[in-house]
Image: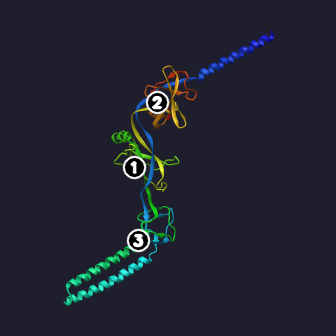
């Protein structure tokens, strides 16, 4: 008799355990559902950008010869007019001396012809010929001085020296690259904007928000100073359908360098934007998904594309419509083709709760 009672007790405990687990499962599978919502808003969008110096030029040799002196090093900051390179000037110095000697001879000939004209010994035509020879000789002197000056290469403006491909003693041809010079006091960031975004930006100026833009660097850290969108190119790219914007950034610490990349963060106005809570999504292999509830309360995963991010919200580009019911809570517990029970929450209430929490 005791054995039967004990066995009955075990059965009772087992049943209570089953009931408890079943209740826990039911509790764990309660879901909340909402809809995407259309709103007029603005959000911060990131655009891949190319960073360029306000001035970046190639320094090239204007004369042929051996590289006699290099007065700077790679990465050095130089002042306007500072001497950078010297090409062996001996040949050009000799040409200048020759031109000066010929000029002196032409000057003496002109003086003699002038004296003879005054005495009516020679004609004025001979004097004019002597004057022409003197002018030609002076022109040769000026040209020789110019060629000699080209043997010294100076910085046309303040900036930073780039790589030096030629070493001391190298034979340099006319027009050969010696280095590059970048003025990094201020920088340009070029980024491409789609045609619809361009039209919204140009026509919706009152609701554009802050016209300042932020530059996010390659290490995902923002540049401490804000920039301004200065210009927009005159034509759209026929292949991409985009147009290039240019923003200017101050660079007092010389942190930015010519050729860097980054992301410009710009406030973009949106009308009738379809937004959903970020927590209603999940990611698989860099693709974003939501669970959509069909008319039979069956869960189906759906891939979506987003146009931008806001605090706690995604702006949906495509993949959803305003009438779709999406899973809000319990995304990690749901699976495709699950039939669920849920509580519906209006999207206005969801957005209000997200804003309150953000505050």
Indicate whether 344 appears above or below 107: above
Of labels 1 and 3, the one closer to you: 3
Most foreground residue, 174 or 3: 174
- Residue found at x 43% / y 62%: 58
The crowding category of the residue bearing disc 1, from other C-alpha atoms within 10 Å (few below 14, some 14 to 19, many at least 20), is many
Q: Position of residue 359 (x, y in %)?
A: 49, 35
Q: Mark 1 points at which residue?
A: 246
Kind of element beneath mark 3: loop
Of labels 2 and 1, the one closer to you: 1
Q: Mark 3 or mark 2, which is nearer the start of the sequence?
A: 3
Question: What is the CA distance from the residue labelled 2 to the residue labelled 3?
Answer: 69 Å
Question: What is the CA distance from the residue labelled 1 to the residue labelled 3?
Answer: 36 Å
Q: Which mark is residue 349?
A: none
Q: Name the residue under label 3.
A: 150
Question: What is the CA distance from the residue labelled 2 to the residue labelled 1?
Answer: 35 Å
Q: Where is residue 246 in the image (x, y as percent from the top left)?
A: 39, 49
Q: Do the residues labelled 1 and 3 touch (CB within 8 Å)?
A: no
Kind of element beneath mark 1: strand
Question: What is the tally of numbered marks visible in this picture?
Answer: 3
Q: Mark 2 points at which residue?
A: 351
Q: Where is residue 115 in the image (x, y as percent from the top left)?
A: 23, 89
Quadrant in the picture for residue 323: top left
Most foreground residue, 224 or 43: 43
Q: Mark 3 or mark 1, which is nearer the start of the sequence?
A: 3
Of labels 2 and 3, the one closer to you: 3
Most foreground residue, 271 or 337: 337
Colouring mode (rainbow / by chain / secondary structure / one colour): rainbow
The furthest residue to the top: 1
Kind of element beneath mark 2: helix
Most foreground residue, 94 or 40: 94
């Amino acid at each position: 008799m005791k054995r039967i009672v004990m066995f009955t007790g075990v059965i009772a405990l087992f049943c209570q355990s089953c009931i408890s687990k079943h209740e826990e499962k039911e509790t764990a599978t309660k879901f909340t559902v909402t809809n995407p919502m259309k709103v007029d808003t603005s959000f911060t969008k990131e655009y891949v950008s190319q960073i360029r110096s306000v001035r970046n030029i190639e320094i090239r040799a204007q004369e042929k010869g051996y590289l006699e002196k290099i007065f700077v090093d790679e990465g050095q900051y130089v002042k306007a007019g500072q001497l950078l390179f010297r090409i062996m000037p001996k040949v050009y110095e000799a040409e200048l001396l020759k031109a000066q000697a010929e000029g002196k001879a032409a000057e003496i000939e002109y003086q003699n012809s002038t004296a003879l004209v005054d005495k009516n010994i020679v004609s004025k035509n001979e004097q004019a010929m002597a004057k022409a020879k003197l002018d030609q000789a002076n022109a040769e002197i000026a040209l020789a001085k110019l060629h000699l000056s080209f043997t010294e290469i100076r910085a046309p403006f303040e900036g930073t020296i780039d790589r030096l491909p030629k070493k001391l003693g190298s034979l340099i041809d006319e027009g050969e690259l010696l280095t590059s010079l970048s003025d990094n006091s201020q920088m340009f960031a070029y980024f491409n904007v789609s045609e619809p975004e361009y039209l919204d930006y140009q026509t919706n100026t009152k609701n554009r928000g802050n016209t300042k833009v932020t530059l996010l660097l390659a290490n995902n850290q923002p540049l401490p100073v804000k920039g301004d969108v200065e210009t927009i190119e005159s034509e759209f790219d026929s292949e991409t359908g985009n147009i290039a914007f240019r923003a200017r950034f101050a660079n007092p610490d010389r942190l930015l360098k010519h050729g860097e990349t980054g992301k410009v963060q710009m406030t973009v106005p949106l009308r009738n934007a379809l937004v959903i809570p970020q927590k209603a999504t999940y990611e698989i292999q860099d693709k974003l998904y939501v669970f959509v509830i069909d008319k039979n309360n069956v869960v189906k995963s759906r891939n979506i594309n987003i146009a931008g991010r806001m605090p706690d919200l995604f702006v949906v580009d495509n993949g959803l419509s305003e009438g779709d019911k999406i899973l809000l809570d319990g995304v990690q517990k749901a699976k495709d083709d699950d039939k669920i029970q849920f509580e519906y929450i209006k999207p206005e209430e969801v957005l209000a709760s997200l804003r309150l929490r953000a505050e």
